Image (cartoon, grey):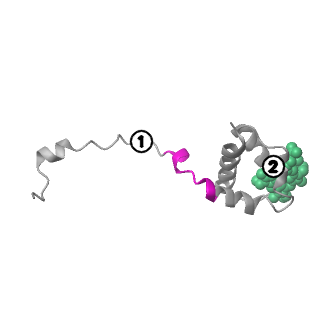
Amino acid sequence: MESRATPSAIIRQPSPPPKAAPAPQAAFDLAQAKTTFENTCNGCHALSNVDSSPPESEAEARALVARMVDNGLSADARTLQQIVGYLARTYGK
Ligand code: HEC
């Protein structure tokens, strides 16, 4: 078996995909985001508040989370973004 890659073997390899912009959608970890949501959003009221009036889009999720920040929720931007992603994917369409 030839272990060294010959030029023709190299040229047969599929070329790597063009440098794509990072895809946050694909990297989104829903299970992790759910945990973050559960740990972050249960401080003031039951999580079931969300089931009573779920956000129906990412824009609504964003507005809801922003309102909770106004209500006194304190979390870093990454955490908030993760929760918006979780809500949008779970309740949005
Ligand atoms: C600092 C306290 C606090 C935290 C933390 C908090 N909330 Fe709230 N939440 C409130 C208060 C106060 C209300 C009632 C006033 C209002 O609706 O803005 C409320 C109401 C809600 C409602 C009902 C809104 C409606 O339209 O009926 C939802 C849904 C909700 N919160 C979701 C969340 C989510 C999601 C998180 C985590 C990102 C969160 N909350 C974290 C204080 C908090």
Chief secondary structure of the magenta span?
A: helix
The answer, for residue 69, to whether it is visible in the render is: no
SS at circle 1: loop
Residue 27: image x %, image y %? 52, 51
Q: Residue at x 69, y 46 (%)?
A: 90
Q: Which mark is residue 47?
A: none
In the rendered structure, the answer to whether residue 42 lies left or right of residue 10 reads right
Q: Is mark 2 within 8 Å of ligand 1?
A: yes
Residue that carries the numbered disc 1 in the rendered image = 20
Mark 2: which secondary structure?
helix
Residue visible at 71% across and 37% down in the picture? 57
Magenta run includes residue 30: yes
Does the image show residue 47?
yes
Q: Quadrant of residue 44?
A: bottom right
Residue type for callout 2: Val
Q: Which quadrant: the N terminus?
A: bottom left
Q: CA distance from mark 2 to mark 1?
A: 35 Å
- Label whose residue precedes the other's in the sequence (2 or 1): 1
For residue 71, side relative to residue 63 (left or right): right
Residue 60, horizontal then vertical, whole percent: 75, 39
Quadrant the C terminus occupies: top right
Q: Amino acid at mark 1?
A: Ala
Which residue occupies the extreme front position in the image? Answer: 1
Q: Which residue is mark 2?
A: 50
Q: Which residues are magenta?
A: 23-32
Q: Quadrant of residue 58?
A: top right
Tell me if label 2 and label 1 are in contact, CB under 8 Å: no
Residue 92, position as x, y percentages in the image: 70, 39
User: From the viewer's perspective, is residue 58 above or below residue 1?
Assistant: above
At horizontal 66% and vertical 44% (from top left) the residue drawn is 89
